[in-house]
Amino acid sequence: MQTWIRFRRPDGDAAYGRLDERDADRVIEFDGAGYTDPRPTGNTYSHAALELLAPCEPGKIIALWNNFHALAARLEKSVPEHPLFLLKPASSLAGPGDAIRRPSGYTGKIVYEGELGIVIGRECRDVRQSEAASHIFGYTVVNDVTASELLNADPNFPQWTRAKGSDTFGCIGPAIVSGFDWRGASVVTRLDGNERQNYPLSDIVFSPEALVSLLSRDMTLKPGDVIAVGTSIGVGSMKAGSVVEVSIAGIGSLVNHVSG
Amino acid sequence: MQTWIRFRRPDGDAAYGRLDERDADRVIEFDGAGYTDPRPTGNTYSHAALELLAPCEPGKIIALWNNFHALAARLEKSVPEHPLFLLKPASSLAGPGDAIRRPSGYTGKIVYEGELGIVIGRECRDVRQSEAASHIFGYTVVNDVTASELLNADPNFPQWTRAKGSDTFGCIGPAIVSGFDWRGASVVTRLDGNERQNYPLSDIVFSPEALVSLLSRDMTLKPGDVIAVGTSIGVGSMKAGSVVEVSIAGIGSLVNHVSG
């Protein structure tokens, strides 16, 4: 297991780093993202003092719908035969500590969705499930923020992209952990300190390996792309000033707040 | 009006260029896309001899649904109150002459949708309609290719992204024309030489300026992003080996074929 971060250096530039395995507060700076075969720059930093950024810069964020058995049961929907997904654009990216901003002109509910995120390490096209793991760089935490009242605002067209694609609605971080074993982990979401989601990733319908394989048949996955594997029960709305924390033990806690 | 292209240089590198207004076969190479305030490199080429590429590299392609009155009437759908859209990923991009490839494992219909494309020139966030034109770099031609039988393959979730997001399904080109007046233009689509679509852009529901303004409230639009404004009546399916040509007089003809 290696833990990779992206951060703002004292000179203001964005940089990549890996936590020293022998000293978790020591960040070893690299000259690129972990999946680009980067080299150490020679600089080190104290983790605690750094301003963290979203740990990668995805070209696309693929967000799954209805990918946990418990949620499918709650929604009274059948489990899908193929992953069901939409895209959140790169422009929606937000990092640890960033404010979640209400879209202009929207006055409805804004909800959190705590999720596991897969970060692609190698380009994938028509990858077999048995080979999928080698294309996964690591795992991160995602808050798949949604302007839920836009979803069904039009009777003829569910507006998934509009509801989930706004700036700051793709919260990702605080780190990417390679070699992370998701099978025993849970996603815990706390709203203003109160636990709202706590579900085991073992309840997933399409595993990360299955997702990478099946999605790579639909479109080429590129290094740095993120797959948000979908949420489970306990989704709820946030208010101006709310603090939302999505945690996966072994990866970390992603904390954001709603501006306003 | 200026006509901008992207092309492969004799040395294999991708490059940007503008057609000489006094000699349409003379391409003046620039060191970046037209919307980046580029400078001439001093190189010139013969247009006829160049391999053209997609004329920009969009971070996202926003594709509109139900944005022409004639199509809404044919579908018996009400005209929407807000633009209805999905995203095609950057990985779906294809240029003039590129093959349209069938997604792995999909055996159903693949359809053409001839459209006008807007190319963003300046970053847009919450832009007023009266200011939208200054954020548009120019216009191009789009074939919004769709694996139509995926759309409703799941009873609970219309798969717009999956149906329209495959590699090579975002055909764009052959050029970007700045200062183009779309109001008097028509989109003409020919399949193996037979005219299948011929509709006036004046029938549009949300004009390019309205789209840029309204979509910029939903998400930040970045230079090079493309908005495919939606198609009208006459959409149909293509077979292996089919040649499809989408033309807008004043911009040009985008020709692609279905790989066999």
Image: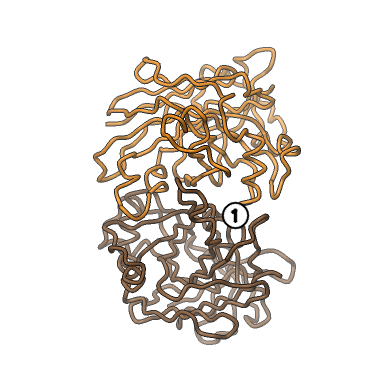
Chain colours: A orange, B brown
Q: What is the x, y in percent for residue B4?
A: 52, 72
Q: Which class describes the residues within 10 Å of circle 1: few (<14), some (14-19), or many (20+)?
A: many
Q: Is residue B214 above or below residue A188?
A: below
- Nearer to me, A57 or A114: A114
Q: What is the x, y in percent for residue B59?
A: 51, 53
Tell me if A148 is positioned left or right of B191 in this view: left
| Figure quadrant of residue B185 | bottom left
Hey, what amino acid is under mark 1?
Answer: Ser
Tell me if B70 is positioned left or right of B14 in this view: left
- Nearer to me, B188 or B117: B188
| Total numbered labels placed on residues in the image | 1
- Residue picked out by circle 1: B91
| Figure quadrant of residue A37 | top right
- Residue beneath the point at 56% across and 78% down: B245
- Residue beneath the point at 54% across and 79% down: B253
Quarter of the N terminus of chain A within the rendering: top right
Q: Is residue B218 above or below residue B58?
A: above
- Nearer to me, B231 or A1: B231
Q: Furthest-top residue in view?
A: A22
- Nearer to me, A248 or B238: B238
Label 1 element class = helix
Q: What is the x, y in percent for residue A9?
A: 54, 29
Quarter of the C terminus of chain A within the rendering: top left
Q: Is residue A20 above or below residue B90?
A: above
Tell me if A56 is positioned left or right of B99 in this view: left
| Figure quadrant of residue B127 | bottom left
Chain bearing tag 1 is B
Q: What is the x, y in percent for residue A87?
A: 49, 46
- Residue beneath the point at 68% across and 81% down: B49
